[in-house]
Amino acid sequence: MKNIIKNIQALQVESPTDKIILQLKQLITSGQLKPGDRLPAERQLSERFGVGRSYVREAILKLEFYGLLKTSPQSGTYVSGLSIKVLDNLISDIIKFNKDDFSALIEARYYIELDAVRLATERRTAEDLHALKIALADYELKISQGLDAVEEDMLFHIKIAEATKNSVIESMMIALIPDLIRNIIENQICGKDRGKLAMKEHRDILRAIEEQDIDAAENAMASHLDEVLQVARTAFAANQIVNKQ
Amino acid sequence: MKNIIKNIQALQVESPTDKIILQLKQLITSGQLKPGDRLPAERQLSERFGVGRSYVREAILKLEFYGLLKTSPQSGTYVSGLSIKVLDNLISDIIKFNKDDFSALIEARYYIELDAVRLATERRTAEDLHALKIALADYELKISQGLDAVEEDMLFHIKIAEATKNSVIESMMIALIPDLIRNIIENQICGKDRGKLAMKEHRDILRAIEEQDIDAAENAMASHLDEVLQVARTAFAANQIVNKQ
DNA sequence: AACCAATTATTGGTTAACCAAAAGTAATTA
DNA sequence: TAATTACTTTTGGTTAACCAATAATTGGTT
């Protein structure tokens, strides 16, 4: 029974945009569209695919975000110079991308944060430290009032990401955080007195960043995230088993 | 003189979409739009901002991707329940996001790949191994012919990302790779006989993955990426100094 | 007064039309 | 013949119009 439901969902996943991306992919893999080529005009594509131009534009926009297409105003949209094989692989992965897998989300977060805290510790400026202290104070205030402080928690982590001075790593964190917060709240990962414990952990992280002790910072972050990672990992293992059946 | 040019570019950066995102942000920070609220109808927004509805939709789409808005068909678009402070920070970071900083790009890639190869080594299936071997063979063929093989190189790394079974980490790699390839080619980071060296390094990585020796895999990956990381790091340090002036 | 059905208005989804800039083409000129 | 100019076509950019589904309102009924 469960399989039927799963299949239905799998089918309906195909949004108009993804359908077009898939068709564009086939156009490339079939050799009708080679790397570097100009795409047919948007109107032609919309006619050929039997869909409005908006969807074609939306699909192009998405592929442009991933650097697979490049459109020049009043001139045309061009396929990236990457080889067919790479294009093929990338497009496949783009279509199947989703952020609903919360164990994957948390796991990814764990690793990125460890990397981020190392870089932040190395590069933090006085301003970064200041921002971190304020964020921590906000967090502690909320906790001391016995309130939920998941977002203040995250704000602290955002400031760490900013302190890395690496815009790419920062962006990755940014892309994860909203879904992360949702998952943490929904799954009630934070236990009742998790807050006060986390407060101490935050302090440890901040101290290490202040003293620019990279290893200490990583360790502090690791133990801070350990509990939530364990939850994700067990869920992950369970999924693996289910998928193998 | 240089500053003038810089400012001009900084000004023209504001695409219609980003302008709207900025306005939405102000709507939130000013308290006119609270977390959980429904946005004004798209028509009203487009009228208020003096711009076509397409741009409003595009902005909403972007913010939806980051999980900050959620739109229900025939009902409305709703602001995420996150606090104003978090929303404010996230939106700011979204606007300033760009993948042009190639040192940041390479650095981020370095860390993600180290994480990825560990997970891949732990979780790779027989199929993953097979795909990796094929990718490696393709790569070696190109190299043995004395040709450029940047893309075959990347394909190998894509397969590693897929073997992690973590869709989030995989997606991050996917988002980086096109720009990565562009940068590597443009900056000619790969020296003339880098190819044959890299071939051996790839073999080391594959062997470690096959034997499921996690630490060996990480070490192999680290030395594989070390050279390119050094290039990025020196560029990074140079940028830091320039920015401080 | 409370509930329910029918109607109206509003919503995002989707398509079509219009615009200015660029590219291509044919006619014109040196 | 080669270069140039004027014109037509095609391009993505942008806006307006239409659609079906939903939400709100109204009027009637119990």
Image (cartoon, coloured by chain):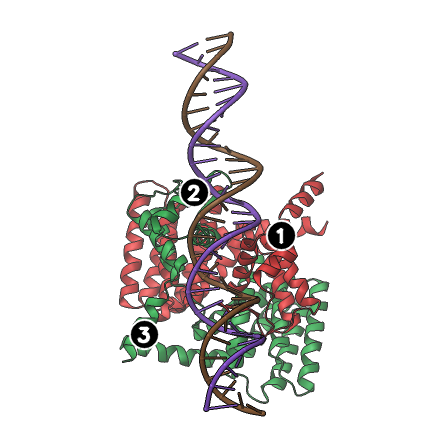
Chain colours: A red, B green, C purple, D brown
* Residue at which label 2 appears: B78
Amino acid type at circle 1 is Ala
Residue kind at label 3, given as amino acid type? Lys
Q: State the residue position of label 3.
A: B6
Residue picked out by circle 1: A237
C-alpha separation, residue under disc 3 versus residue under disc 2? 37 Å
**Helix, strand or loop status at disc 1:** helix
Which of the two labelled residues, at mark 3 and mark 2, occupies the earlier sequence position?
3
Q: Nearer the viewer, residue D14 or B62?
A: D14
Q: Nearer the viewer, residue A153 or B186?
A: B186
Q: Chain of mark 1?
A: A
Distance from Cα at disc 2 to Cα at disc 1: 35 Å
How far across and how far down the image is residue A203, in percent? 33, 56
Q: Position of residue B43 (x, y in %)?
A: 41, 45
CA gap, disc 3 and disc 1: 51 Å
For the residue marked with disc 2, what is the amino acid? Tyr
Instruction: For the C terminus of chain B, give its image quadrant.
Output: bottom left
Which residue is drawn at the image coordinates 31% and 44% (left, top)?
A142
- Dot 1, crowdedness within 10 Å: few (<14), some or many (≥20)? few
| Numbered badge on residue A186 | none
Same chain for the residues under marks 2 and 1 in the image: no
